[in-house]
C-alpha cells in the first residue's frame, strides 16, 4: 500500500521496525520536502516487498559498480522520474537511505547516494569504503552522507 510522505507532520508509518524510526522518518520527510519544493513532486513510498523491481535495480547497481551488498532489511522503496532523471530510493531498517539518480540522456549525471539517519552507526559494508560528510536538517537532525558516480549503463 503506497504511503504519501508528509513533511509537515513527520510520521514513522512504515518505519516502525527501525531502531532509529523517528530519525529515519525525518530523513524520509527531508527528501519529500526537497522533491516537493524543487520539482513539485509528491514523494510516495511503497513497502519494499510490494515493489521488488526497484530494490532489484538498486541492488544490481550496487553490486556491479562497487561489489556492495547491503545487509540491512529494506523497509520502503520509491521510484519516479523528474526532469529526465530516474530516481530510486530504498529506506532500510538500520536507518540507511540509498538513492540512485540516473539521468536518462547519455552523458548525464548518474550517482548513488548514501544517507545515514541521526543516531545510527555507519554500516560495516560502507565504513571502510566511504567517507561521510555531515549536514544539518530541521526534519532529520544530523544527516551523514556520501556518494559515488555510476559508470555503467542500467
Image: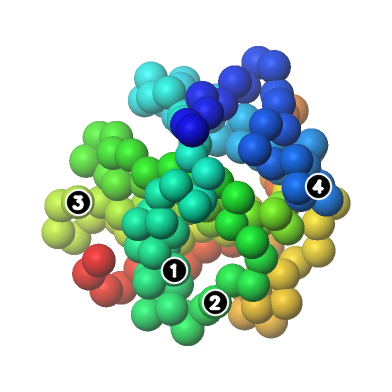
Question: Does dot 2 land on a helix, a strand or a loop?
Answer: loop
Does the residue at mark 2 contact the one at mark 1 (Cβ under 8 Å)?
yes
Task: Residue 57: give x, y in percent of width and height.
Answer: 35, 62
Residue, far left? 106
Of callouts 3 and 2, the N-terminal one: 2
What residue is shown with label 3? 104
User: Residue 27: which quarter of the image?
Assistant: top right
Q: Nearer the viewer, mark 3 or mark 2?
A: 2
Q: CA distance from mark 4 to mark 3?
A: 34 Å
Q: Nearer the viewer, mark 1 or mark 3?
A: 1
Q: Is residue 9 left or right of residue 114?
A: right
Of callouts 1 and 4, the N-terminal one: 4
Of callouts 2 and 1, the N-terminal one: 1
**In the image, which disc is placed on residue 127?**
none
Q: CA distance from mark 1 to mark 4?
A: 23 Å
Task: Residue 14: give x, y in percent of width and height.
Answer: 65, 38
Callout 2 crowding tier (Cα within 10 Å): few <14, some 14–19, many ≥20? few
Task: Residue 7: give x, y in percent of width and height.
Answer: 62, 22
What residue is shown with label 1? 59
What residue is shown with label 4? 20
Amino acid at each position: 500500500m503506497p504511503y504519501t510522505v508528509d513533511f509537515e507532520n513527520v510520521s514513522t508509518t512504515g518505519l516502525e521496525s527501525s531502531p532509529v524510526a523517528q530519525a529515519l522518518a525525518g530523513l524520509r520527510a527531508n527528501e519529500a520536502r526537497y522533491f516537493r519544493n524543487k520539482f513539485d513532486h509528491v514523494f510516495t513510498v511503497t513497502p519494499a516487498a510490494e515493489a521488488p523491481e526497484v530494490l532489484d535495480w538498486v541492488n544490481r547497481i550496487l553490486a556491479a559498480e562497487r561489489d556492495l551488498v547491503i545487509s540491512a532489511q529494506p523497509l520502503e522503496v520509491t521510484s519516479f522520474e523528474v526532469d529526465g532523471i530516474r530516481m530510486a530510493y530504498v529506506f532500510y531498517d538500520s536507518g540507511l537511505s540509498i538513492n540512485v539518480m540516473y539521468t536518462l540522456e547519455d552523458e548525464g549525471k548518474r550517482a548513488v547516494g548514501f544517507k545515514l539517519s541521526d543516531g545510527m552507526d555507519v554500516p560495516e559494508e560502507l565504513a571502510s569504503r566511504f567517507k561521510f560528510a555531515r549536514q544539518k536538517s530541521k526534519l532529520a537532525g544530523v544527516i551523514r552522507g556520501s556518494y559515488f558516480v555510476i559508470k555503467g549503463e542500467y
